[in-house]
Image (cartoon, helix red, strand yellow):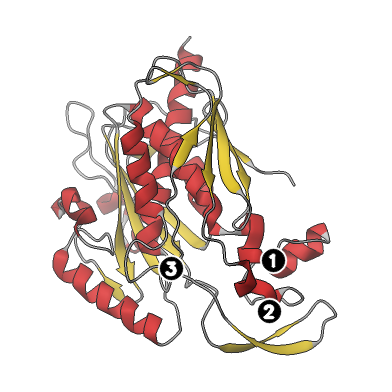
Amino acid sequence: MAGNTFGNLFKVTTFGESHGVAIGGVLDGCPAGISLDIEAIQNDLDRRKPGQSAIVTQRKEPDTVEFYSGIFEGKTTGTPIGFAIHNTNQKSHDYSHIKDSYRPSHADYVYDQKYGFRDYRGGGRSSARETASRVVAGAIAKQFLGDMKINAFVSQVGELQLNKNYTELDFSLIESNPVRCPDQETAAKMEEYIKKIKKEGDTIGGVITCVIQNVPIGLGEPVFDKLHAELGKAMLSINAVKGFEYGSGFEGVKMKGSAHNDQFNTDGTTKTNYSGGIQGGISNGMDIYFKVAFKPVATVIQAYDTIDKEGNKVATQGKGRHDPCVVPRAVPIVEAMAALVMADYTLLNRTIKL
């Protein structure tokens, strides 16, 4: 299986399956001498881990990261950083009913067709549990980036939308509620709605907004390696993501060019930021902001029809522990992937200047 590595210079390779002994990764290319706050890395993992509230999957995993290389006396050594997160609460029998059949809108069918063999326990390698490894690598990338700040938050659940510009929000409130929406009134409505969906045995999708601040001018290349293209690739590599837009996004098509153009201030900043901090594929120093759309989780705790390996129609029912809405736990994953991209492009920019 190819495609387990992300990045060019600052790159991570992940390994492991949902119900295997452990998941983990190797982060290569991180410069030496970066002081690491291990507690901050674990905090990001805790934000992603299952069982953290009543509106997420109740699988109980401590998700404690163990580092095996690349760190000495609290600093990176410049060598590969190896780490692992041990699985402790697998309930593989919850998936025995799909051993010979395929769940709709999951990777089960295409995985089996491509490889001729699959680990049906929790989706195996295609499980979103793999993203915990990305969060570890992304948390290290955040510390390498220094003053560059990355904040993601839930801005929509189903039809419930946070109708405020990110500049009006207090990012310190993101962690004040289980939905991770920095508006308490909207967050309360979202939480109740997710609980209602969960009680019905169903799921719902949502949107995460991410803001990157204190970005230097010059990250990204103007042709195939555009910064926003790499951010899009990073976000679309996350399980359940169905859409990505940055800056004015799809709403921009409603505007005339005279209104959409970001007029310059004398210091090179712009009066508006419809470009989303990126022009011609290169960062312009303004805030980068984008949205990531997540579909409803494919596993619903209801009866449904599907097919088995022989192509026969069969009836089954969703079982196990699953998120009724994935976006609250996906917030740190979006931040991690954004951090990996920004770290990679920071190193690429240094190489080009040399």
Using the rendered image of the protein, determine whether residue 280 is visible from the camera's viewpoint.
no
Locate residue 215, reporting x and y percent: 31, 31
Q: Could you give the CA–CA distance between mark 1 and mark 2, rounded to whole angstroms?
A: 10 Å
Q: In the rendered structure, which amino acid carries the disc numbered 2?
A: His
Q: Which of 325 and 160 lies nearest the eye of the viewer?
A: 325
CB atoms of marks 1 and 3 within 8 Å: no
Locate residue 91, reporting x and y percent: 57, 67
Q: Secondary structure at mark 2?
A: helix
How dense is the environment of label 2, judged by Cα within 10 Å: few (below 14), some, or many (20 and up)? some
Image point (51%, 60%), residue name: 89
Locate residue 177, reporting x and y percent: 22, 62
Residue highlighted by disc 1: 120
Q: Could you give the CA–CA distance between mark 1 and mark 3, rounded to whole angstroms?
A: 18 Å
Q: In the rendered structure, which amino acid carries the disc numbered 1?
A: Tyr
Q: In the rendered structure, which amino acid carries the disc numbered 3?
A: Thr
Q: In this view, which residue lies farthest toward the front?
A: 88
- Splitting the image into 4 quarters, where does residue 305 fall? bottom right
CB atoms of marks 1 and 2 within 8 Å: no
How dense is the environment of label 1, judged by Cα within 10 Å: few (below 14), some, or many (20 and up)? many
Residue highlighted by disc 3: 57
Image point (75%, 47%), residue name: 1
First in sequence, mark 3 or 2: give its number. Answer: 3
Q: Could you give the CA–CA distance between mark 3 and mark 2, rounded to whole angstroms?
A: 19 Å
Q: Which of 193 and 150 lies nearest the eye of the viewer?
A: 193
Residue highlighted by disc 2: 97
